[in-house]
Amino acid sequence: MRKQVWIHLGPPKTGTSAIQKWMVANRAWLGTQGIMYPEYEVGANGISSGHIHLLLSESNGKFKVDPAKVKSVYKQFEESPYRILLLSSEYFFYHAESLAALLPKVKFIAYVRCPIETFESVYNQSVKRHGKTEPLSFSKNLHTTTLDRLSELATNIKNGKVYFRAYLQSNENFNLVSDFLSVLKLECIVDNENTNASYTFEALETKRWLNKFKLDSLNDEIDSALQALSEGTRNYTLLPEDRKERHFKQCVQNLKLFHTKFHIKNANILFNSLSKRESWHQMSQDNQRGAINFISARLFELHPKLYQRVSSQLKKLPSDNSDKVLIKEFSRFHNIRNILLLPAFNLYKSKASMLLKKVLPRYE
């Protein structure tokens, strides 16, 4: 039996969490298909670092490929009945050449995403999880850091091959996990599941403002609540009008050049999505008050206890005049705490929800 090693590289912001969450939950089924997929821990939010510790070691805060670990894992695989060893981690994206030098004829899987989307998604994540407070700034030219790195590793890897796939967010016409399985010639019915979903525009702007106050003890709850909100503006871009034409032109040119050199399987869906993306809502980050008005009403309605705790903390913190206005806007329902905490309130939640939607101001 000919054995194969497949390594999923990501890269970041291409749905790695969704793929890894499904794979680790379906290890037993993968095993029946002859695939060895070592286990790892998945966080409560469905996010993990995959197999990073299986092949890499950390020293002084930096990860490096550990030859002894690689040798050990490969030996276990050779002695196993499995025909394919499948490993996944976004950290491998930065160490692909070193891994290729240690593993015989390794095959890499990497997803290619629209560079504009990647740039905005990285920003979204920095607001969600890393406390960023500044608005997004676009330079004159398109950011192609990830695409450049993919070109580099595709050129440098000699003892192996890289298979490139077009990345789209999972929707009714595209399922990322099913697409990933198809690379391994596997078929399975997979439900679409949004892991590590992006914020709506209003949630993004509210979280960006809240980051100023370092509400560390509440951040995880705030993130979960905002991520779960379905109301608000989706399919939006922060790309300003005066940069739009230039960035889209550069995006198409760079992707076509990459496709010509390295071949992106199902590239057509990537270029089709680009044409649709041009009609996305263009949003400006100069109206945080409107976003805060909208989101605070939703939190008050859907997560009343969290809303009250956030409001209480904000009122205690020192702030400048502009933030005092926004704090007042956010916490305008703070004194309605008692009715929300009454046990009987839940009995009338659906009717109360309808009433709140009529009387609370909405962000337009």
Image (spheres, rainbow, N blue to C red):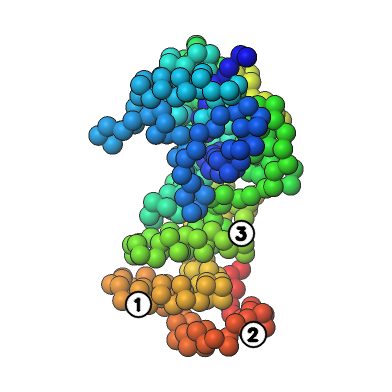
Residue occupied by mark 1 = 315
Q: Secondary structure at mark 2?
A: helix
Mark 2 or 1, nearer chain start: 1
Q: Nearer the viewer, residue 245 or 128?
A: 128
Q: Secondary structure at mark 1?
A: helix
Per the rendering, the mark at residue 348 is 2
What residue is at 39 percent from the left and 51 percent from the top?
130
Q: Nearer the viewer, residue 188 or 123?
A: 188
Instruction: Answer whether labels 2 and 3 touch (C-beta < 8 Å).
Output: no
Question: Number of callouts in the render?
Answer: 3
Per the rendering, the mark at residue 326 is none
Q: Quadrant of residue 234?
A: bottom right
What residue is at 35 percent from the left and 21 percent from the top?
68
Residue 130 visible? The answer is: yes
Q: In the picture, which quadrant includes the N terminus?
A: top right
Mark 2 or 3, nearer chain start: 3
- Position above or below: 229 against 131: below
Q: Nearer the viewer, mark 1 or mark 3?
A: 1
Residue occupied by mark 3 = 233
Mark 1 or 3, nearer chain start: 3
User: Residue 135, how many percent across, how many down?
Assistant: 43, 53
